[in-house]
């Protein structure tokens, strides 16, 4: 019987994988960082990223998908292990994790049909010649159906890679058999249409995975722990479901696996399930892990929106899982486990499930985090966040996230900081951003920044706008302007005659827009406003000049596209409003005009204009002025926090 079934076990208590003892039940889930070099070798930046997560208290640190064959590579900066030349770098990485208190493990992977010929130079291979529905990183290639020789070669590649991982000092390996990659493709009836011993029934579909486990145990080390990460469900029609996954877990246990790690989804899942966004409930895969856990006696791990100590503790205490796997939560705050154990819950940097981390990985720029600009740049921050050699007076004007990030960073460096906000509270646009449906997680970001300012040495001035002379009277060495931007108002015939409002006026519920609304804009704010209104029973038409949500992260694009369709929102893309009047709007769609009648209000969500007059005025007084956030034009939350932080570090 699995040890975690005893109700009351704590997430902070030791756990075991076979004979390997782990100091607690917190696991850094394997997470692509895009920090390897372009040949797949470990870099100093990659080592620093994982060392910090080990130092932060994660008991088991599973290093990202590391590819066992050059044809299986998926991203430009994936880590590789198909050759002995990769062992020295991996050894440095494993040692850094161990030296900082974590147990190092390595995930082994092959992309199968998710690999890209453009990157690898090889035609992708798969159980059957069925292309991926969606790769998240480009158009899918048509894969070649694997021969028995291909299967033998790939299997041997996984076994050899396990041996290299052990040689490099990793204490366990994880086989990546979820998320629609090669081993997952064999398990899924949607992607595996073979009619030989590797396809058809569950026993056949799991054969390659069980064979790899047995061979690792026989050829590498019987006592070397092997974790298999599988999907509870592919979350696509015709894909793997929970009942089959439970049978697969039983077969894997019989083959000698030491733990089962439970995830969900492939890249084509709707909603996006591999990395669920903030609309999905916390601990979203707990029921899946509990179902599988009831069928096996080996430890079960689970991932999925575990972003508070309370959720993590409940998972283990209630017997839903033996280990909790955190990915984004440990990107946001590497020290989550230590802070949780010490009761410093309010100091934990919250993961808000915005998925900017995923967007940066898919953009091949290194994993980044809205809430933690330090993520993947640990070495740079170590060099640039030292105490300032001379304490200066810094005035920050604007109490939104960019201003709060700048003020807190400057204060931490030893400067005397004044934060001026004309309203009666800090927060800026973030005070409204959490109000649309299923965006409540953003309030945690707001509360976190307010908490940071409250416990810092920053002198806060609220409730009025300061004159230029008053700002100058503080004798600042530097001024940081973070006052936000002005909503862009399109030049539109009749707009002054119609009932026209900006999106923020709707979200703040300052006015009643009536029951029939036209929203101008196709970005995230426009769609959130449409969602906000449609949820309240309004009839909404979106008019977007191009496509919808072109700059949004993929998970948001999928979620909101499906949601506004479900809510019955009319969407006109590649369209523009030609003219508006009292109760009507004339729209041009693909060179054809149509009239929308019975319009109660026009709601403009067309971006923002830079607000640089204050900077010029203060510069005219001879002050050294810097800017951060929307004051320079439309910014994402991610960019605003980063800019505020970096500006302050440069002073």
Image (cartoon, grey):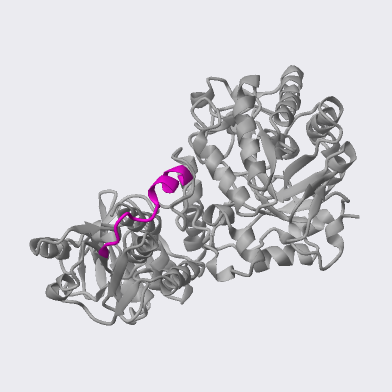
Q: Is residue 418 left or right of residue 549?
A: left
Figure quadrant of the C terminus: bottom left
Instruction: Please tell me which residue is depicted at 51% across the width and 67% down the height of the picture.
Output: 441
Residue 134 seen from this side:
no
**129 vs 651: above or below:** above
Question: Where on the picture, by quarter, is residue 514?
Answer: bottom left
Which image quadrant: the N terminus? bottom right
Residue at position x 45%, y 56% from top?
Answer: 370
15 sits left or right of 537 in the view = right
Residue 72 % position (x, y): 61, 27
Which of the 4 quarters of the picture holds residue 56? bottom right
Q: How many marks?
A: 0
In the rendered image, residue 275 lying in the magenta stretch gets the answer: no
Magenta segment: 377-393
- Furthest toward the front, the residue is 389
Q: Position of residue 206 (x, y in %)?
A: 80, 36
Q: Determine whether 203 is above or below 581 in the image.
A: above
Residue at point 35%, 79% (across, down): 425
The image quadrant of residue 422 is bottom left
Residue 20 can be seen, yes or no: yes
Would residue 45 be found to the left or right of residue 145 on screen?
left
Percent of width and height locating residue 15: 80, 53
Q: Position of residue 241 (x, y in %)?
A: 74, 49
Identity of the residue furthest to the left in this view = 620
337 is higher (above) or lower (below) than 381: below
């Amino acid at each position: 019987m699995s040890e975690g079934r005893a109700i009351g076990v704590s997430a902070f208590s030791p756990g075991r994988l076979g004979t390997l003892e782990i100091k607690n039940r917190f696991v850094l889930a394997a997470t692509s960082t895009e920090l390897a070099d372009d040949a797949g070798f470990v870099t100093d930046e990659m080592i620093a990223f994982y060392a910090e997560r080990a130092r932060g208290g994660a008991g088991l640190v599973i290093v990202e998908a590391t590819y066992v064959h050059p044809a299986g590579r998926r991203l430009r900066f994936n880590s590789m292990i198909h050759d002995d030349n990769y062992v020295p770098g991996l050894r440095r990485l494993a040692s850094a994790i161990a030296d900082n208190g974590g147990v190092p493990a390595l995930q082994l992977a092959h992309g199968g049909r998710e690999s890209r010929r453009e990157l690898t130079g090889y035609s992708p291979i798969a159980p059957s010649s069925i292309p991926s529905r969606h790769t998240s990183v480009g158009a899918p290639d048509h894969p070649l159906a694997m021969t028995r020789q291909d299967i033998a070669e790939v299997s041997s590649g996984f076994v050899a890679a396990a041996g290299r991982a052990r040689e490099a000092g990793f204490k366990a390996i994880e086989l990546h058999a979820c998320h629609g990659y090669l081993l997952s493709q064999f398990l899924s009836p949607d992607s595996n249409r073979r009619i030989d011993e590797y396809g058809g029934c569950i026993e056949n579909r799991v054969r390659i995975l069980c064979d790899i486990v047995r061979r690792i145990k026989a050829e590498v080390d019987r006592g070397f722990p092997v974790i298999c990460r599988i999907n509870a469900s592919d979350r696509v029609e015709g894909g793997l479901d929970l009942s089959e996954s439970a049978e697969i877990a039983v077969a894997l246990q019989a083959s000698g696996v030491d733990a089962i790690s439970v995830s969900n989804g492939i890249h084509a899942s709707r909603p996006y399930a591999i990395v669920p966004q903030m609309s999905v409930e916390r601990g979203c895969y707990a029921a899946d892990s509990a179902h599988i856990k009831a069928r096996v006696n080996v430890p079960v791990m689970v991932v999925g929106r575990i972003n508070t100590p309370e959720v993590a503790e409940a998972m283990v205490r209630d017997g839903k899982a033996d280990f909790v796997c955190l990915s984004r939560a440990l990107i946001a705050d590497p020290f989550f486990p230590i802070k949780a154990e010490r009761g410093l819950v309010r100091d934990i940097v919250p993961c808000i499930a915005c998925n900017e981390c995923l967007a940066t990985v898919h953009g091949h720029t290194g994993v980044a985090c809205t809430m933690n600009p330090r993520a993947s740049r640990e070495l740079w921050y170590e060099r640039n966040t030292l105490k300032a050699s001379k304490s200066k007076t810094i005035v920050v004007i604007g109490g939104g996230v960019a201003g709060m990030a700048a003020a807190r960073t400057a204060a931490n460096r030893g400067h005397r900081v004044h934060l001026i906000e004309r309203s009666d509270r800090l927060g800026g646009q973030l005070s409204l951003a959490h109000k649309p449906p299923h965006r409540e997680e953003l309030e945690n970001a707001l509360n976190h920044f307010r908490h940071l300012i409250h416990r810092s040495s920053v002198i806060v001035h609220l409730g009025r706008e300061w004159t230029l002379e008053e700002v100058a009277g503080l004798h600042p060495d530097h001024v940081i302007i973070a006052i936000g931007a002005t909503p862009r108002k399109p030049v539109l015939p009749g707009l002054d005659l119609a009932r026209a409002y900006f999106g923020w006026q709707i979200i703040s519920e300052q006015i009643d827009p009536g029951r029939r609304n036209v929203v101008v804009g196709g970005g995230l704010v426009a769609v959130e406003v449409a969602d906000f209104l449609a949820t309240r029973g309004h009839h909404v038409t979106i008019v977007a000049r191009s496509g919808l949500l072109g700059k949004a992260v993929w998970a948001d694009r999928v979620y909101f596209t499906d949601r506004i369709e479900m809510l019955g929102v009319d969407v006109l893309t590649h369209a523009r409003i030609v003219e508006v009047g009292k109760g009507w709007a004339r729209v041009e769609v693909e060179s054809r005009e149509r009239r929308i009648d019975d319009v109660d209000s026009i709601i403009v969500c067309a971006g923002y204009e830079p607000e640089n007059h204050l900077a010029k005025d203060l510069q005219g007084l001879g002050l050294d002025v810097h800017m951060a956030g929307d004051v320079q034009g439309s910014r994402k939350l991610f960019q605003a926090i980063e800019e505020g932080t970096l500006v302050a570090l440069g002073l």
